[in-house]
Image: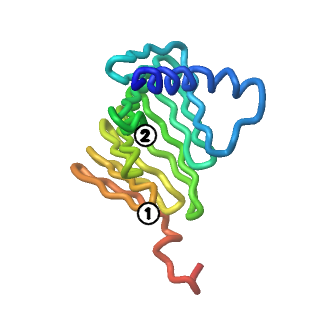
Amino acid sequence: MKRFHLAMLLTLCLCVPLAAQEKEMEPDTVVIRSDQVEIDLNSGVAIYTGNVVVEDKPAMEINCEVLTLQIEEGTQEVNKITASGKVKIFLTHEQGSGIATGEQAVFFVDQDRIELTGKASMETLQGKMWGDLIYFDRATYKLRAKGNIRMEIDPKMLQKEGDK
């Protein structure tokens, strides 16, 4: 029974890109496109390679070379997503949009948190940040960085409200 649920989930992951081409998707549907995919039903791992694009509209889009989905045993839910190779994440939020880049991004689904490494950067309307490791909490829209931090802040953000 467990393998059947996992097989159904992974089969749906493969079918979503085809269905997306045929009709408008539901708002919460995540669409994954790539050149190829390899799915291991025993371990619950799916690896997408080549021109990978993940659309989680309207909140996020991920572009990378390799994307690995890990399914949590017991719940059959994706619990960890790892994007690697020229990672670029486009974020949209009620507080503004941003672009995050790095060589690797790990998305911890249950915590709604992204960890960027490898020449990591995050750019928002307020400015740009670089670091060895950047944590981004999607739920609170907060950033935290470690190692070799550099920031460029838009001068308008430093002015008082009346001075703008």
Q: Secondary structure at mark 1?
A: loop
Instruction: Where is residue 42? Give x, y as percent.
Output: 34, 17
For the point 71% across and 36% down, the residue is: 25
Q: Residue reaching furthest right?
A: 23
Location of residue 46 (image quadrant): top left
> Compared with residue 80, is residue 96 higher up or lower down, i.e. above or below?
below
Q: Whole-percent x and y of residue 64? A: 47, 28
Return the residue found at the far front.
1
**Left or right: 2 with respect to 124?**
left
The answer to whether 69 appears left or right of 93 in the picture is: left
- Within the image, what quadrant is residue 28 found in? top right
Closer to us: 5 or 129: 5
User: Which amino acid does the dot numbered 2 rest on?
Assistant: Thr
**Circle 1: residue type:** Thr
- Residue at 34% in and 35% down: 74
Q: Which residue is mark 1?
A: 140
Mark 2, residue position: 101
* Residue in the picture at 37% in, 58% down: 143
